[in-house]
Amino acid sequence: MPPIRVLLADDHPVVRRGLAALLGTLDDFEVVAEAEDGEAAVRECQLTRPDVVLMDVRMPGIDGVEATRRIRKAVPDAAVLMLTMYDEDATVFTAMQAGARGYLLKGAEQDEIADAIRAVVRGQAIFGAAIASRMLEHFASPPGQAAADDPFPELTAREKEILELLAHGRRTAEIASALHLSPKTVSNNLTAIFAKLEVTDRTAAVIRARERGLGG
């Protein structure tokens, strides 16, 4: 069997060198390219057509989640495996929605990383043990359990209105029109909402909102 061709995407050179050295000790892997940000990851993936992309979540420019989304459209045969230090549920769900096939935390043992790469090449979905446990708990919870009379007490009344419309799939311009606001005002409120909910983008905010009963 030919070696599994791997692209390493991480903004820290030391991490990339460490991963390259780790995979270099194994006969069934070949590192074909490296990328220091999301845009470079998409570009190198199109050029080298790897079997697997080991992708960090937070990088300069477009982040790993958006890079994953673009790679899945441009090079659908490439499997993306997130390897990051961030284990927030919203980030995990957003990455999987973008098309990632697995999610591991940095610090995973060599055998775990190697086995995960082989697994995603076979089409399996792979998660680190702690993340897998939390995901099982999430999907085992009764629908709407997280909802309460006021599921987001940290938000202002206006922010709750905007989040409700966001959860219904409305775009920024549509929210602005519905609430008689400017798109800039809506964007500013969305930034505040993301910060208060500790999510990175609107997709993660929608997931959080629907978990708590909005947008139904």
Image (cartoon, rainbow, N blue to C red):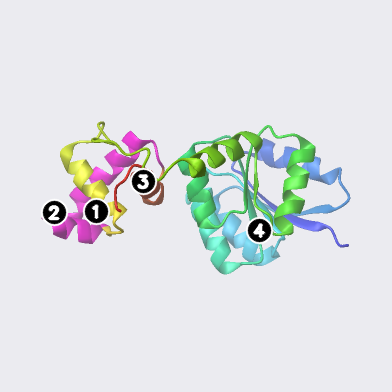
Residue visible at 57% across and 62% down in the picture: 71
Majority secondary structure of the magenta segment? Answer: helix
Labelled pair 2, 1 in contact (Cβ < 8 Å): yes
Query: Is residue 128 at least partly visible in the picture?
Result: yes
Q: Quadrant of the N terminus?
A: bottom right
Q: Is residue 60 visible?
A: no
Residue 79 - label: 4
Q: Secondary structure at mark 2?
A: helix
Q: Position of residue 180 (x, y in %)?
A: 10, 55
The residue range painted magenta reads: 172-199
Q: Position of residue 134 (x, y in %)?
A: 54, 36
Q: Nearer the viewer, mark 1 or mark 4?
A: 1
Q: Which residue is mark 3?
A: 205
- Sequence-wise, the earlier of marks 2 and 1 is 1
| In this rendering, position of residue 148 left or right of residue 81 | left
Where is residue 150 drawn, in percent x and y?
24, 35
Label pair 1/4, CB-CB below 8 angstroms: no
Q: Residue furthest left?
A: 180
User: Which kind of residue does numbered mark 4 sit on?
Assistant: Ala
Q: Nearer the viewer, mark 2 or mark 1?
A: 1
Residue corresponding to mark 1: 165
Q: Amino acid at mark 1?
A: Leu
- The residue depicted at 46 percent of the width and 40 percent of the height is 141
Query: Farthest residue toward the front?
Result: 142
What's under tag 2, amino acid-wise? Answer: Leu
Horizontal side of 188 relative to 50 (left or right) equals left
Q: Nearer the viewer, residue 204 or 190?
A: 204
Magenta stretch: residue 174 in it?
A: yes
Circle 2 residue: 179
